[in-house]
Every structure is written in C-alpha cells, then in structure tokens.
Amino acid sequence: MEPTIALLNGDIHTMDEKNPVVEAVAVYKNKITSVGKTTKIRGLANSKTKIIDLKGRTVIPGITDAHVHFTPYAILARQVNLNGASTIDEALAKVADKAEEVEREEWILGRGWDKNLWEGGGFPRKEDLDKIVKNNPVVLNCKDGHVMWVNSKTLELARISADTPQQPGGEIEKDLETGEPTGILKEEAQNIVRRIIPKPTIKEITEATLEAIKAFQSIGVTAITDSEGKLPFRVFQNLQNEGRLGLRISMMFPVENLDSAIQFGIQSKFGNDKLRGHNGAAA
C-alpha cells in the first residue's frame, strides 16, 4: 500500500519503547503504516505520495488536552488581550486598534489589565476610554476578574448613573465630588453589565472555533476532551459535517443534560473518531 504522505529525514518520536526514535514515517490516508529509515520509507513512495523533507526537525504524536472549555477559550481569544500591558497608554492603544476593526456600536470586550503595573497604581476611569472610543460600548475585565472597567457608552446602555444603588456584594465606584460612576465596577456590580452583553451568535462561535482550532494545531494539540453544552456541540457537528473539524473531540455532556440525552437514546461512546461523547459532569 503506497503511502499518501511520507515524512523523511526527521527526528520522529514514536512512543514505542522498542523503537523510540526513527528518521521517517509513511502515512496512508489517516493511518501510519510504516516507520524506519529514510531510505526504507522513500522506497515505499510513488509519484502520488506527498514527500515532506523534515530536514532534521522533530515530530511527536499529537497532544491531547484532557479537559478544556473550548468555546469560552475561543471567544476570549478574539477579545482585546491586555495581559502584560505595562502602562495605561499601552492598554488604551490596544483598545484603539480593536475599535478600528469593529463596526459602529459593536461591543468591544477585553481582559487582563493590571493597574499594579501602571504608574501610580490607581484605577483607570471611563474618561480614559471615552477619549478613544465613543460609539462602541467597551468592557474590560481586570487580570483577576474582580473588577470591570467600562466607558460611558456602556454605563449608558446598562443604565448606571449617580442614582443607581450599590449592589449587594459589589461596588459601583463613584466620584467623591460629583457622585457620577467612574467606570469601575467591582465584584457583583459587574453583573449589571454582564447581563446586557450580547450572546455570541452561531456564526461568531463558528468563526472563533475555527480560529481556535488553528491555534491548537499550531502547538501540536490534535485532540481534546471538552466540557460544554449543546450550542458548542452543535457547532462541532456542523464543522464535522462540513469536513472542517480539525481536532478529535470527546464531549463531556453536562450532568443536567444527561436525562435528556438518555431519553433521546444516546449511549456512551457514540460518534466516531472525530466527534464523540461520554457521560461526565461539567466542571
């Protein structure tokens, strides 16, 4: 059986104790059919075989992430990443770049800012964001997730004003002189804004998922165990049907959905080598 792909001249780790490292490997469709010396594998190839000269590079088996919440990761990866921004100006520049990419009034979401890295170490204010973004609501979560920084547009949409009462377990930070909200929401007060942030659409989740799949592939992850609900599963099924699901996925169905799954007749290990499910409680 002539290989469809032949990897030659590499440092290929097989995970086989008897033959741990080889130079070359032959693949037929999606199965490894032979390993060994480059001369051996080259001899198996024909004119239709795709030859890849590794030039000494390393090949390892695909990595499996045994527990991931893939869709939240995919959605977060599209947001403004403020991790490591050493000044408030650096953080604002990243927000400004994002503002140029989005439509008018589209929400701009971000995460990771750390005021302790900034000169003075004080909390930022809505005015800092208002200078660069006026027509888009901006919501930026701090590094530890306990504080949210928003602009005036977001406060307007959330109907947060000087008259808004404080929330149990949280704080709407207000200016000591004017009483107006500063744009900083702490702990449970963040929920006022979270409730009005639009949920991602199927199209947005699909686009984010495809981008995240490429990111996982780029670091050698080829399979995941994913703990999520029905919407991500629907996206995975759609991508599988379209031939675009570039990972092997084992879904853990949330425990609250198990009765419905059982009534529908779904059994353990249903699916195929690309997408399957098993009983498990989401964490």
Image (cartoon, rainbow, N blue to C red):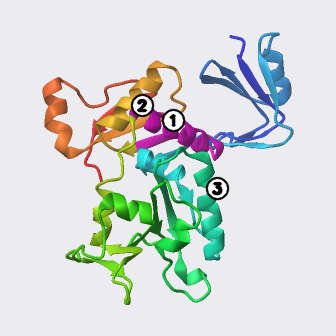
Picture residue at 53% right of the left edge, 43% below the top: 103
Disc 2, SS = helix
Picture residue at 80% right of the left edge, 11% below the top: 46
Q: Which residues are magenta?
A: 202-225
Q: Residues within 10 Å of mark 2 (few under 14, many from 20)?
A: many
Question: On residue 97, which mark appears?
Answer: 3
Using the numbered discs, state the Cα–Cα distance from disc 2 to disc 1 in whole angstroms.
12 Å
Vertical order, 123 against 3 (above or below): below
- If the image is split into quadrants, where does the N terminus sit? top right
Reading the chain from its start, which is encountered first: label 2 or label 1?
1
Q: Which residue is mark 1?
A: 207
Question: On residue 37, which mark appears?
Answer: none
Q: Which residue is mark 2?
A: 236
Q: Is residue 212 magenta?
A: yes
Disc 3, SS = helix
Of 241 and 278, nearer the camera is 241
How far from the left and from the top, in percent, is residue 132?
Answer: 59, 63
Identify the image quadrant of residue 20.
Answer: top right
Disc 1, SS = helix
Picture residue at 30% right of the left edge, 68% below the top: 160
Seen in the image, is 220 located left or right of residue 123? right
Vertical order, 236 against 17 (above or below): above
Identify residue type, mark 1. Glu
Question: Which label sits in the foreground, 3 or 1?
Answer: 3
